[in-house]
Image (cartoon, rainbow, N blue to C red):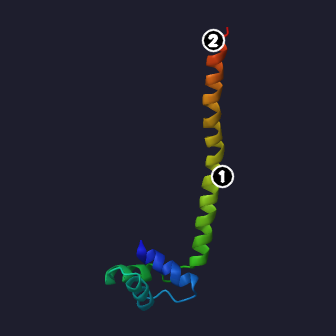
């Protein structure tokens, strides 16, 4: 996870996400550097528009949150209705 965070930090700061820069970020954070993980990550990010991917991820998250909101409200209302029915039966 620290490798992804390092790449995002480099991108945010306008630095090139390459092996050398990523090694510096990881080592300066006090973590041990795994050369193979860095190479795989840099190769995977080659040609990827990080800003576009982050925007897509934000839209997906917003859509999921919006879709879940009505379900959460419906679940909260059902127990109240059942409780009201139970009290009504007491007073017949």
Task: Identify the residue at image location x=58%, y=87%.
Answer: 14
Residue 74 picture quarter: top right
65 vs 6, left or right, is right
> From what the image shows, is residue 89 above or below residue 8?
above
Image point (64%, 17%), residue name: 87
Q: In the drawing, what numbered circle is on residue 66?
A: 1
- Write the residue at 61% across / 24% down: 82
Residue 53 shown left or right of residue 44 in the figure: right
| The image quarter in which residue 90 lies | top right
Separation (CA) of disc 1 from disc 2: 39 Å
- Residue 13 position within the rendered picture, expressed as x and y whole percent measured from the top left: 57, 85
Q: Are marks 1 and 2 in contact (CB under 8 Å)?
A: no
Point out residue 34 in the picture as x, y percentages from the top left corner. 32, 81
Tag 2 secondary structure: helix
Give how far across and how far down residue 78 sits, in percent: 62, 30
What residue do we see at 41% from left, 71% from top?
1
Residue at the spot of label 2: 90
Return the disc, 1 or 2, that comes first in the chain's sequence: 1
């Amino acid at each position: 996870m620290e490798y992804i965070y390092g790449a995002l930090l480099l991108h945010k700061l306008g630095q090139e996400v390459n092996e050398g820069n990523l090694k510096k970020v990881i080592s300066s954070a006090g973590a041990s550097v795994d050369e193979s993980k860095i190479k795989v990550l840099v190769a995977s990010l080659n040609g990827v528009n990080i800003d576009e991917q982050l925007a897509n991820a934000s839209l997906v998250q917003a859509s999921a949150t919006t879709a879940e909101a009505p379900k959460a409200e419906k679940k909260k209302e059902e127990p109240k209705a059942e409780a009201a029915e139970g009290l009504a039966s007491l007073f017949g």
